[in-house]
Amino acid sequence: MPYSLAPALPAHRPAMAQLWVESWVKTLPEIDFEARRPWLESHLDDLAAGGALIRVALDGEGAVAGFVVIHPGTGYLDQLAVAPRVWGQGAAEALMDEARRISPALVALDVNQDNPRAVRFYEKMGLTIVAEGENPMSGRRTFRMEWRGGHAAQAPRGP
């Protein structure tokens, strides 16, 4: 399915928050992500105020299929979320391509070690594990993963 990418608008926020909750509930059902929805709203505001760019992937009907938040100065990808209804249909890949376009030298992120689906996805997108850490909110173990531009072997291209 082709997706169009656009800067996130205030009108996109409810759909972004909903798909974020849905994707996390499906991934880690033992955590109450609905209770974290207000945190996400303020976190997105703080990230944007700090210079991060927020892009949405819109499906053919204009519905928000996913979003990515990346800071072009640091290359830190803070959020990448895709609605479960479109998992495996190219939205995450389109959002990663957008992150690499915005930050062509470096994309770095932290991912929960107990989220093997996400770890495999990021590895498929050319990121490598460079360190381990801990999520300050959940206490879960994390991997720091990075993609560095200019390395042809790490820059897979889609069809």
Image (tube, rainbow, N blue to C red):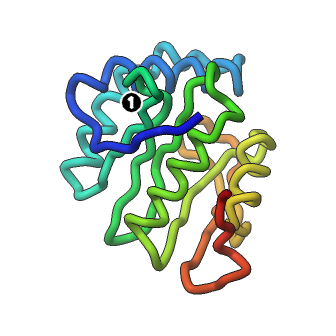
Residue at 66%, 34% in the rendered image: 89
* Label 1 Cα crowd, 10 Å radius (few <14 / some 14-19 / many 20+): some
| Front position in the image: 4 or 143 | 4
Measured from the top left, where is residue 93 in percent x and y? 60, 49
| Type of amino acid under label 1 | Leu
Q: Is residue 115 left or right of residue 98?
A: right
Measured from the top left, where is residue 65 in percent x and y? 49, 28
Image vertical order of residue 41 relative to residue 32, above or below: below
What quarter of the picture does the N terminus occupy? top right
Measured from the top left, where is residue 74 in percent x and y? 38, 70
Image vertical order of residue 63 relative to residue 88, above or below: above
Q: Is residue 58 left or right of residue 46?
A: right
Image vertical order of residue 128 relative to residue 19, above or below: below
Residue matched to label 1 = 40
Q: Is residue 85 left or right of residue 119?
A: left
Look at the numbered disc 1 and give the secondary structure of its residue. Answer: helix
Count the marks: 1
| Front position in the image: 139 or 87 | 87
